[in-house]
Amino acid sequence: EQRQIIEWDKDDIDVLKFMKVDILALGMLTCMKKGLDLLAEHKDQHFTLQSIPAEDPRTYAMIRKADTIGVFQIESRAQMSMLPRLKPRVFYDLVIEVAIVRPGPIQGDMVHPYLRRREGLEAEDYPTPELEAVLSKTLGIPLFQEQAMQVAMICAGFTAAEADQLRRAMATFKNTGTVSQFQRRLIEGMRANGYDEDFAERIYQQLEGFGSYGFPESHAASFAILAYSSSWMKCTHPDV
């Protein structure tokens, strides 16, 4: 098998500004393919990842009990500890579950406020309708990189290019602290747009947490699809 190999690692390539694409193998895709083939062969039930029944109540009941050993993404000790607290009931709950058990949301003090709001123990806080439009689906807590970019543009007057620079800073999660270079720009921009300093500082601290690995919503959603599909297989066809 012929392959081309270069002597530089990914960090060298990043410094040189070459395009770098991460292509990762997912063993769960192979497991699901084999499982669906076995269903077709032995039970004459024909499914694809796209046609697996959505929002199956039994599957979500199993997930809420943290009976998730062997499924994708939500079988770690930290994820299993979160599942009975977050209590996923619909697909978007799984998107949040995948994203919230990460260093970024944890270090940005987003996890406990989100859970309190989800349980009705804390009121959602939206100083402006524009901010509510961005954060309402996560109860006022910025959990995803896309939301952080929108908050910077709406609240602090960032341009799209500046927001993309912020996203890049958040993405370089190994270099913790890279988001701090935007601190003055963010806080001063929010104050200039009428947000009080306490709120501006809180938003900045949450966004700074993304410097320790914040998750894109699109990435979390794609992982949640596999998490649900593999959970459905375990719940409805454990013999497979």
Image (cartoon, rainbow, N blue to C red):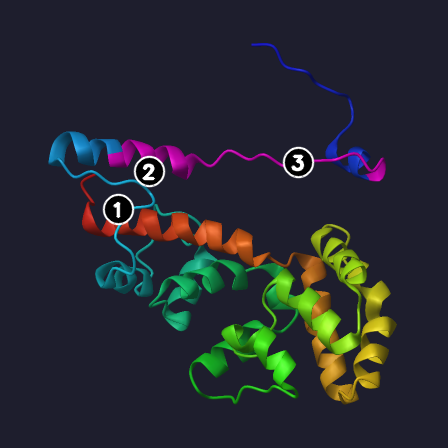
Q: Looking at the picture, how far across and down is residue 67, in whole percent?
A: 30, 57
- Counting residues from the start of the chain, the first of labels 2 and 3 encountered is 3
| Kind of residue indicated by mark 3 | Val
Q: Which residue is at the far top?
A: 1
| Kind of residue indicated by mark 2 | Met
Residue at 26%, 36% in the rendered image: 36
Residue at 64%, 79% in the rendered image: 131
Which picture quadrant has residue 218? bottom right
Residue hosting label 1: 233
Query: Image quadrant for the C terminus?
Result: top left
- Are circles 2 and 1 on residues that touch, CB within 8 Å? yes
Q: What is the spatial separation of the Cα atoms under label 2 and label 1, in whole angstroms?
A: 8 Å
Q: Looking at the picture, how far across and down is residue 200, in whole percent?
A: 75, 81
Q: What is the spatial separation of the Cα atoms under label 2 and label 3, in whole angstroms?
A: 25 Å
Tell me if 8 is positioned left or right of 49 in this view: right
Tell me if 199 is positioned left or right of 214 in this view: right
Tell me if 176 is positioned left or right of 218 in this view: right
Which stretch appears magenta? 15-36
**Callout in the foreground (1, 3):** 3
- Are circles 1 and 3 on residues that touch, CB within 8 Å? no
Q: Which mark is residue 32?
A: 2
Residues packed near mark 3 inside 10 Å, few (<14), some (14 to 19) or many (20 plus)? few
Q: Is residue 202 above or below residue 180?
A: below
**Camera-nearest residue between 86 and 163:** 163
Residue hosting label 3: 21
Q: What is the spatial separation of the Cα atoms under label 1 and label 3, in whole angstroms?
A: 31 Å
Q: Secondary structure at mark 3?
A: loop
Residue at 35%, 53% in the rendered image: 228
Q: Secondary structure at mark 2?
A: helix
Tell me if 114 is positioned left or right of 63 in this view: right
| Kind of residue indicated by mark 1 | Met
- Counting residues from the start of the chain, the first of labels 1 and 3 encountered is 3
